[in-house]
Amino acid sequence: EDQVTQSPEALRLQEGESSSLNCSYTVSGLRGLFWYRQDPGKGPEFLFTLYSAGEEKEKERLKATLTKKESFLHITAPKPEDSATYLCAVQAGAWAGNNRKLIWGLGTSLAVNP
Amino acid sequence: DTEVTQTPKHLVMGMTNKKSLKCEQHMGHRAMYWYKQKAKKPPELMFVYSYEKLSINESVPSRFSPECPNSSLLNLHLHALQPEDSALYLCASSQDPPGLRRNEKLFFGSGTQLSVL
């Protein structure tokens, strides 16, 4: 069964304390792995798409990497404004009707203290 | 314009009411989505419209009725809802329908926070 698992469930960091969030997946044929950021009461905001093992993408203090089994979202010297829930989603190769479904993880809630 | 606009932002309704949620995008996207999200859970897909036609209905109860009047607008009509339907309802769009191409990132609106009393 296709599955996406994120860890940790919650993470509290001090400002400037770098860390990583994990998204592990078991899917039949990865088409793409997506990272989104969600602030409370808002819709998710797209961050990155990764397609193949070894791929890396960066945006400001965030860097996403991908292996054949998992993805990491590295946060370097975080600031309080980086506090949010980070969601990982995977598009698998299996078809659901005429479309390929997006499988979501439960998210990591990140709090960065000043 | 890279926004998906949803109205209203908040909605409180009784179980016998009829209400509608509205969503609009002007990015020329060919797919639009309704998601439901409960607290501390990921978004849960409800419906997908591809090229203005309903392409996915995730076995959603008939008290939720989607409508796509044109390529920029998406509505969700609500009737006889239950308290357990209280959630954040999110509209999203993507350039192409899911599975068609590789770059299928979703653009989400800010959502409608729905409370059913």
Image (spheres, coloured by chain):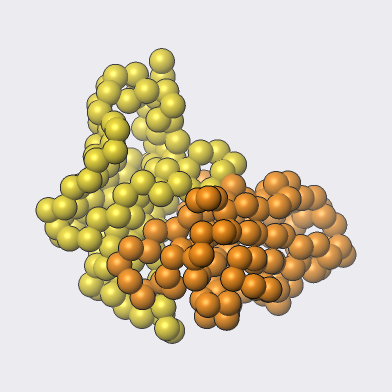
Chain colours: A yellow, B orange
> Which residue of the protein is positioned furthest toward the top in this rendering?
A114
Answer above or below: position of A44 versus B46: above
The foreground one among B69 and A45 is B69
Residue at the image point whose x is 58% and y is 59% from the top: B25
- B107 to the left or right of A91: right
The foreground one among B22 and B2 is B2
Question: In which image quadrant can residue B97 be found?
Answer: bottom left
Residue at the image point whose x is 33% and y is 63% from the top: B103
Q: Quadrant of the C terminus of chain A?
A: top left
Residue A4 visible in image: no
Q: Position of residue B76 (x, y in %)?
A: 69, 66
> Which residue of the protein is positioned furthest toward the bottom in this rendering?
A97
Residue at the image point whose x is 64% and y is 65% from the top: B73
Q: Position of residue A12 (x, y in %)?
A: 37, 27
- A22 to the left or right of B92: left
Question: In which image quadrant can residue B54 be found?
Answer: bottom right
Residue at the image point whose x is 76% and y is 63% from the top: B20
Question: In which image quadrant can residue B69 be found?
Answer: bottom right
Q: Quadrant of the N terminus of chain A?
A: bottom left
